């Protein structure tokens, strides 16, 4: 019989050594992944932007950018568009979140679900749906001309107003989600105390509620701003190219004029710098104050009078009516035949689905394959990262947290250009570059959506007390066995919800994939863009409809598993 028990000092020392070696190896692999597929591409982007054709350091390209009136205008228009979208989504998102959290009204439970659904529609699909309904020859203008005597069609879509409309109705759920989480944690007694001394209505909201939900609001505002700032597909569809993201894309894909190609790289680098500045300012602003007064007290929802009930239902119903316009447009164009200068299609068919599913199935199969692989990357690296952030005091933990947060702030267009520059050379000892391999799509999607799996897992770990794990370890269970037998069964819902959210956003990705896709590896977003720009709008709509169905299924699963609390940017 072995004289040493399972908990002898020698065994404990061996276990700690194995843990230290295993933990160090795991952290090293995570940092290596981020170094190769996040830090290195950004370094290469800035290196190419800050060197001349001879490889010498030069900032002349940046000087040329700021001396060019067109590019300066594009930069300020991009910033103003982002600010405008934050303003409009704030108005809708805060109002809807406040109504859902604080009041009980007819249809509240249904509204909670419906107000989040618009987020599953990719902006590229949304803008097409809006064009089909609100375009110059769309349903609304045809009805106005045929039945109300309108002579000239109204320009709803083609201009900045069209981009603002699409981005607002697509992104306001992001703001709502962020505000819902923050608002539900505010101790109601604080507002009651303010009301007792005469602070009521808008004044109470301005002085008490709004300041206390600052972390959630800043989270939503940053996400909305960066998403709008980086979107180039929506502006191009509505005929706007004097914004930074469209210019970066157009200058890179033209492959003819070296100066324009260089300027595309410079614009991408400037977009990254601006995004990082916005992120730092946002985190700095949140850290200026103490929000420890936030609590998880139960909030009693107030009953509304019949009149206010009607007004609330009308408000939310109107928002949802506009938000669901693109669903109608995509559905009609996907199934409709001979829809030209008529309010609705003259007949309906499945022909376009046959073409995109049977004749060109690669768009669907590639999308599901790459999104699944990307989600695998998110799980492989995201769960350990969340564990490190929530459960350890590992060296470089704060740096790791900052890198994960940085990913959320990076514009997809700039990331796509960075990958183009970083992985264009052949892999060592081979004659193939990573850019020519489909796996590059899965990698960039995995990196781009990694934070959502991290935050979903991290949020679940926070509510599992360490004592459960300590009890398992005290009877001899190692870290891996403790995680498998104790921790994982308690946090699997958070992991699954975070990974599904990463999956659904991988399905939507257009900015990076449009730049990196090679023939044969096209995904749905690329197929939609290519079909529409080539004049095959029905096929584009059919692909968009398929993307919506897949996204809706994923969203239903997420909603049933985790509700609407997915964690915030700042953890």
Image: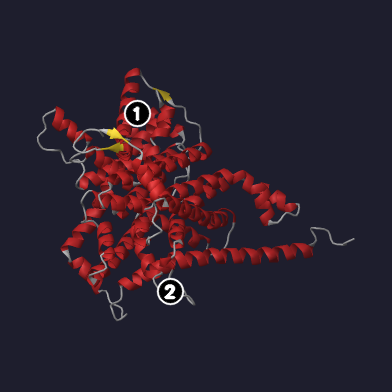
- Residue placed under numbered mark 2 in the picture: 426
Q: Is residue 447 placed above or below 539 in the rendered structure?
A: below
* Residue count near mark 1 (Cα–Cα under 10 Å), binned few <14, some 14–19, many ≥20: few
Residue 382: image location, x then y, percent: 52, 55
Q: Is residue 264 placed above or below 176 in the rendered structure?
A: below
- Quarter of image, res 130: top left
Residue 557: image location, x then y, percent: 50, 39
Query: Is residue 569 visible in the rendered structure shown here?
Result: no
Point out the tag, 2 or 1, that comes first from the N-terminus: 1
Quadrant containing the N terminus in the rendered view: bottom right
- Quarter of image, res 490: top right
Number of marks in picture: 2
Q: Nearer the viewer, mark 2 or mark 1?
A: 2
| Residue at image point 24% right, 51% down | 80
- Residue placed under numbered mark 1 in the picture: 198
Residue 433: image location, x then y, percent: 43, 70
- Colouring of the image: secondary structure
Residue 204: image location, x then y, percent: 35, 33
Residue furthest to the right? 1
């Amino acid at each position: 019989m072995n004289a040493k028990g399972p908990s002898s000092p020698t065994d404990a020392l061996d276990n700690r050594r194995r843990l230290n070696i295993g933990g160090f190896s795991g952290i090293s692999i995570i940092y290596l992944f981020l170094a190769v597929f996040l830090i290195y591409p950004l370094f290469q982007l800035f290196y190419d932007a800050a060197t001349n054709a001879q490889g010498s350091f030069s900032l002349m390209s940046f000087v040329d950018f700021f001396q060019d009136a067109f590019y300066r205008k594009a930069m300020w228009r991009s910033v103003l568009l982002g600010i405008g979208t934050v303003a409009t989504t704030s108005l809708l998102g805060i109002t809807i979140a406040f109504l859902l959290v604080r009041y009980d009204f007819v249809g509240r439970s249904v509204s909670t679900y419906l107000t989040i659904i618009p987020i599953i529609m990719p902006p590229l699909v949304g803008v097409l749906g809006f064009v089909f309904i609100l375009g110059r020859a769309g349903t609304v203008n045809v009805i106005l001309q045929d039945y109300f005597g309108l002579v000239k069609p109204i320009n709803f879509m083609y201009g900045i107003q069209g981009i603002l409309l699409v981005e607002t109705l697509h992104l306001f759920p992001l703001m709502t989600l962020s505000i819902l989480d923050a608002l539900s944690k505010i101790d109601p007694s604080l507002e009651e105390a303010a009301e007792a001394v005469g602070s009521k209505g808008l004044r109470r909201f301005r002085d008490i509620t709004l300041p206390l939900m600052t972390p959630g609001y800043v989270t939503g505002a940053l996400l909305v701003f960066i998403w709008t700032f980086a979107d180039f597909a929506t502006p191009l569809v509505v005929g706007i190219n004097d914004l930074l993201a469209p210019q970066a894309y157009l200058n890179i894909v033209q492959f003819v004029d070296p100066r324009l190609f260089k300027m595309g790289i410079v614009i991408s680098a400037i977009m990254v710098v601006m995004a990082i500045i916005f992120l730092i300012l946002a985190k700095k602003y949140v850290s200026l104050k103490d929000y420890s007064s936030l609590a998880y007290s139960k909030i009693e929802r107030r009953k509304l009078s019949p009149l206010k009930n009607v007004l609330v239902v009308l408000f939310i119903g109107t928002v949802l009516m506009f938000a669901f316009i693109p669903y109608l447009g995509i559905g009609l164009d996907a199934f409709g035949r001979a829809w030209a200068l008529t309010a609705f299609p003259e007949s309906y068919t499945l022909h376009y689905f046959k073409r995109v599913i049977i004749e060109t199935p690669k768009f669907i199969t590639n999308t599901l394959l790459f999104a699944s692989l990307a989600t695998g990357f998110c799980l492989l690296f995201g769960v350990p990262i969340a564990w490190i952030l929530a459960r350890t005091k590992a060296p470089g933990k704060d740096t790791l947290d900052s890198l994960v947060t940085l990913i959320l702030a990076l514009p997809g267009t700039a990331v796509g250009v960075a990958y183009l520059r970083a992985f264009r050379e052949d892999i060592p000892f081979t004659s193939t570059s990573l850019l020519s391999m489909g796996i590059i799509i899965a990698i960039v999607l995995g990196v781009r959506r990694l934070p959502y799996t991290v935050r979903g897992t991290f949020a679940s770990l926070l509510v599992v007390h360490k004592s459960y794990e300590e009890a398992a370890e005290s009877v001899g269970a190692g870290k891996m066995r403790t995680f498998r037998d104790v921790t994982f069964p308690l946090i699997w819902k958070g992991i699954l919800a975070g990974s599904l959210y990463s999956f659904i956003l991988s399905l939507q990705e257009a900015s990076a994939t449009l730049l990196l896709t090679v023939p044969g590896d096209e995904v749905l977003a690329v197929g939609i863009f290519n079909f529409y720009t080539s004049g095959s709008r029905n096929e584009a709509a059919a692909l968009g409809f398929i993307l919506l169905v897949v996204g809706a299924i994923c969203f239903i699963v997420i909603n049933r598993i985790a509700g609407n609390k997915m964690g915030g940017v700042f953890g």
